Amino acid sequence: MVNLILSRVRCTSFISLRYFSAKPKVVLDDTVCTLISNNEIKYRHHPGIVIPRTPVFPQWALKEIHNILKEKQIVLKELKESTKKLIQHLNNRHPPLEQYELPEKLQKVEEHLNINNQNEKILIEDIDFLKDAKSRMILKQHVYNWQPIQFDKFTSVTYLVGRSVQNYAVLRKIFDEIKLRDKNFKPQTLFDFGSGVGTVMWAASEIWSKTLKEYFCIEISESMIELSERLVKATNPKIKEVFYRQYFPISMNRTYDIVVSAYSLFELSGMESRIETLLKLWLKTNNYLIIVEEGTNAGFKLVNEARDFILKYTNSKRRHDIQFAHVFSPCPHDLKCPRFANDNTPCNSSVLYHPLQFMGGRQHKSERYSYVVLKKSKRPENDEQWPRIVRTVLKRSNHTICRMCTNSGELKEEIFTKYKNGKHMYRCARESEWGDRLPIHYEQQQENVEETETVSETATENENTLNEEIKFH
């Protein structure tokens, strides 16, 4: 007899588990896809592109600038040197230091003075900066000595020659996008704060020549006003109704369709003055408020300060009257600027321009600028909110790399290929440039990330010995 003892029975099963993760899929805008498929538009003319790429400076302005220099008998060599210094100053300047920032700056000066000091510690209050040249040099490195620019007759002509072409190109490109995207906008009045030689008027009058009837200019420099008045007489198409003031009008009741502050915030004496001015400008507009500054870190910070202030002001819960505002461009959202929050580089755009030939400019150059266009209304429900390309498009063999700011308030980098994204999207990306919008959307999709198998074991034990007797006879 044989006894078989079975103490445990194992049952093994395999269970398949599949994990998913949400990854946004890039999709070409349906309308754009249809237009391209039907050969109604070409890739290089997709609606996210802002043209012209290189705005052409008006011929009448070139001719009048030549006449002004000839009449004033200005030596060209001196003018070139003065222009070089002015542009260098504009590109390197910073806003005035605020009072709360001063102790930290002086602390850094004190630390710098004591780096290799073996004697008694040098205290900032004991230093005579007028007599100590070394200390004065270190102070200049850490504490920016802001001064407003005094635009006398010669400096005003220098600014006209050195900056009018760039300023015109920038404003022309900004206005062109407004006209392209807001086809029903027919402005009749324009308010220009810090109007200078009048480049804002020139650009606006060419785009809305049939509707703009009145221009109101604020400019503190009499020499600048004289130049602007001289140049306005030569404009083509003609600009007739232009009013100049050196200071803000007392009455704030009158409003305008477009309000512009171009390259003017640096001239204000501090944050309090800037905020006060921004509030006045916002109250002056019916539709658009445009803020433009140099595309430097300092210029970008002033533009972002203006953007944040207007959005917070209109959304304040303490307000009794209801106001609306949204960012028309360049941002596809009203959230905190991701570049300002996460990066040390400015959010800026680039435009090509042809320098004045008599100043030695034979090839086109690139002008970088920071700007924001705020519209006095809710964001429309049909607003595409396409991503904005915020850096140079990298065009490589069989693929294109775009760095973009998206409507979710994030910076994203996408690599476009024909195989992955299709011909239409790839070609749209390849024809786009820095500052354009890319007609795409992000859609959430489920992506299969991992499939695993797990082993499940069950065991049953028979506590009593199972005896089976097999008898052999």
Image (cartoon, rainbow, N blue to C red):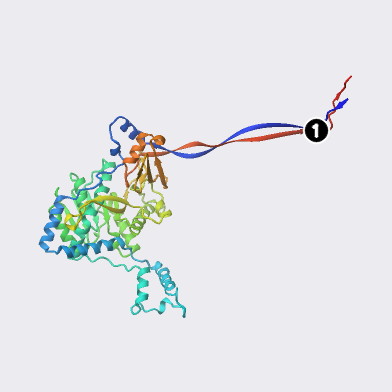
The quadrant of the image that shows the C terminus is top right
Pointer 1 residue: 7
In the rendering, at what x and y percent does residue 84 appear? 23, 62
Residue 303 lies, in percent from the top left, at: 34, 55
Decide if residue 306 is in sight here: yes
Residue 369 vs 112, above or below: the answer is above
Q: Nearer the viewer, residue 267 or 118?
A: 118
Residue at image position (31%, 40%) is 431
| Residue 274 left/right relative to 64 | right
Image height of 12 relative to 221, above or below: above
* Residue 302 x/y as whole percent: 34, 58
- Residue 257 appearing in the image: no
Locate residue 449, reporting x and y percent. Answer: 53, 38
Left or right? Give the position of 117 relative to 85.
Answer: right
Mark 1 neighbour density, 10 Å: few (under 14) some (14–19) many (20 or more): few
Q: Quadrant of residue 223?
A: bottom left
The type of residue carrying mark 1 is Ser
Residue that lies at the very extreme toward the top in this rendered image: 473
